Image: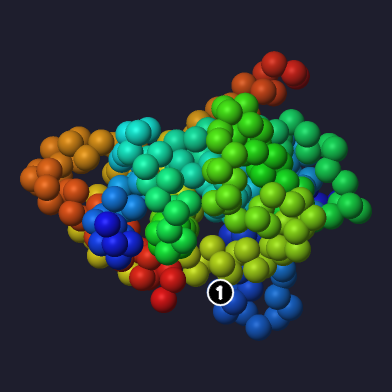
Amino acid sequence: MRESDYIASGILQDYCLGLLTDEEKKKVEAMCHVYPEVARELNLLRSALEKYATSRIEHKTELRRAVWESIKKLSEEKP
Amino acid sequence: MKTTDNYSLHQIISEPSTTDDHSVKLPFDTAILLDMIRSKSEKGFHILYDKYCGALYNVLIKIVLRTDVADDLLQETFVKIWKYIDRYDPAKGTLFTWMLNIARNQAIDYLRSHGYRQQLYEYIDPFLLHADCVGTADINTSDLEFKDLKSKAMQLDKKYAEVIDMIYFHGWTQEQTASKLDLPLGTVKTRARKGVEMLKIIYHQ
């Protein structure tokens, strides 16, 4: 398979979104080791998604609540 | 001495550029924030969280690569910050650097304790693995970068954003997403891939 076909297949996007099985993930990682162009593309996709997730973190209000709850629990344990 | 409660949230977290008055512009005051955390104030927590959750989350997700794990580690990071705040010494570096190191160490410990394959490290931004380099990031730069990330996120078309948010950000399956949005599964799969592709263009152009 040509690298460009592999990149265009959409499997790298699925990898980044966490949609692949362990078996499928290993295949993608193996491809990255053989083809630098595939690894480069994977890194670009992954870092874009990370940036996006980071920019959306404030929208996870339930997470903020959970963090504060754990902190409160901490001070109850050690007054 | 003024008590920290005399400062409004707005006063403390607002950016100089957003105030209309032309008098002396007050920079964000870390010393006030530090006092609030040391006195275990809830308001202090919210200011700290608003200010730094993005930067800390970014470090975590870069290392662990998964939003669900990064969520847990963000929680643990804030708990540690709270617990050990008295060990923070301003003479040794900024509060931001100190917190970044806590986040980074949490993430690396996680990888080690879960026996991640060595090859995973190859994908990690090398600077993240060296504590000294993290120290060069200063808070204003980080703020600015975070704002930039946010404005770019707005460029993603809503039809892709909702799919990416549900799958990647909230951990839904593609099937659940399709059912919730009342879309065919094939459409969800296509939009998920297209959405990631669009983000690559938005963030790397």
**What residue type is disc 1 on?**
Thr
Task: Give the residue displayed 44% in from the left and 71% down from the top.
Answer: B204
User: Is residue A11 something that shows in the picture?
Assistant: yes
Q: Residue B184's spot in the image, x, y percent?
A: 8, 45
Is A75 above or below relative to B96? Answer: above
* Residue B33 located left or right of residue B170: right
- Image-quadrant location for residue B127: bottom right
Name the foreground residue: B77 vs A2.
Answer: A2
User: Is residue A48 something that shows in the picture?
Assistant: no
Q: Which residue is mark 1?
A: B18
Is label 1 in a helix, a strand or a loop?
helix
Task: Give the residue displayed 56% in from the left and 43% down from the top.
Answer: B119
The chain letter for the residue carrying disc 1 is B
Name the foreground residue: B59 vs A3.
Answer: A3
Is B36 above or below relative to B18? Answer: above
Name the foreground residue: B13 vs B8.
Answer: B13
- Image-quadrant location for residue B126: bottom right
Q: Residue B183's spot in the image, x, y percent?
A: 10, 46
Is B173 above or below relative to B126? Answer: above
Q: How is the image coloured?
A: rainbow
* Residue A34 located left or right of residue B140: left
Is B161 above or below relative to B109? Answer: below
Few, some or many C-alpha atoms within 10 Å of disc 1 (few <14, some 14-19, many ≥20)? few
Q: Residue B158's spot in the image, x, y percent?
A: 24, 60
Task: Give the residue displayed 69% in from the left and 16% down from the top.
Answer: A77
